[in-house]
Amino acid sequence: MVDIAIEVTDRKGRISQLAGTEGLTLMDALKSQGLPVAATCGGAKSCATCHVYIGEGSPPLDLPDEDEVDLLSESDHYREGVSRLSCQIVLVPTLGGLHVELAPQD
Ligand code: FES
């Protein structure tokens, strides 16, 4: 198991560093750090309360599938090409250096 370094900006602009566990999701990492990510559907891709923005300079991610884009695009805070559901991002070593920002809650 490899710890994956992630930088997070919360909704008040505070920046924190966390070490995500390979194989878990970004949503798991955020919640385990005590960050305010509701994730009410538990990762079932149906709530969008785990919405984050991927920061510039982050390593490339797999593209979101159609269901993820559909759900995110219903949000008032959707940003095309930047918004992601953190529950759909599985942490792998190549994601070290990822920067994310918590999206506002709808
Ligand atoms: S936790 Fe519900 S969509 Fe991610």
Image (cartoon, helix red, strand yellow):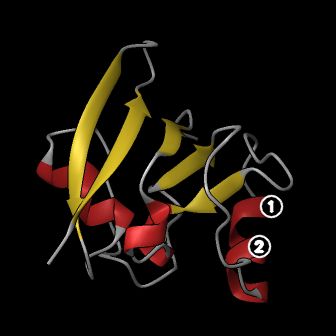
State whether label 2 is within 8 Å of ligand 1: no
The residue that label 1 is drawn on is: 73
Q: Nearer the viewer, residue 83 or 60?
A: 60
Q: Nearer the viewer, residue 70 or 35?
A: 35
Q: Tell me where residue 22 appears, x and y as whole percent.
A: 25, 75
State which quadrant residue 28 falls in. Answer: bottom left
Residue kind at label 2, given as amino acid type = Val
Give the residue at x 77% y 48%.
Answer: 78
Q: CA distance from mark 1 to mark 2?
A: 6 Å
Secondary structure under tag 2 reads: helix
Residue kind at label 1, given as amino acid type = Ser
Give the residue at x 27% y 33%.
Answer: 17
The reply to whether dot 1 and dot 2 touch (C-beta < 8 Å) is yes
**In which quadrant of the rendered image does the C terminus lie?**
top right
Measured along the vertical axis of the image, is residue 18 above or below residue 74? above
Measured along the vertical axis of the image, is residue 81 above or below residue 9? below
Q: Tell me where residue 92 appears, x and y as whole percent.
A: 39, 75
Does residue 91 appear in the picture of this structure?
no
In screen coordinates, is 10 left or right of 98? left
In screen coordinates, is 35 left or right of 70? left
**In which quadrant of the rendered image does the N terminus lie?**
bottom left
Crowding at dot 1, Cα within 10 Å, few <14 / some 14-19 / many 20+, comes out as some
Q: Tell me where residue 2 appears, x and y as whole percent.
A: 19, 70
Measured along the vertical axis of the image, is residue 86 above or below residue 31? below
Secondary structure under tag 1 reads: helix
Give the residue at x 48% y 72%.
Answer: 89
Does residue 32 appear in the picture of this structure?
yes
Q: Tell me where residue 80 appears, x and y as whole percent.
A: 86, 53
Q: Which mark is residue 51?
A: none
The residue that label 2 is drawn on is: 69
| Residue with the most extreme right position | 80
Give the residue at x 24% y 57%.
Answer: 29
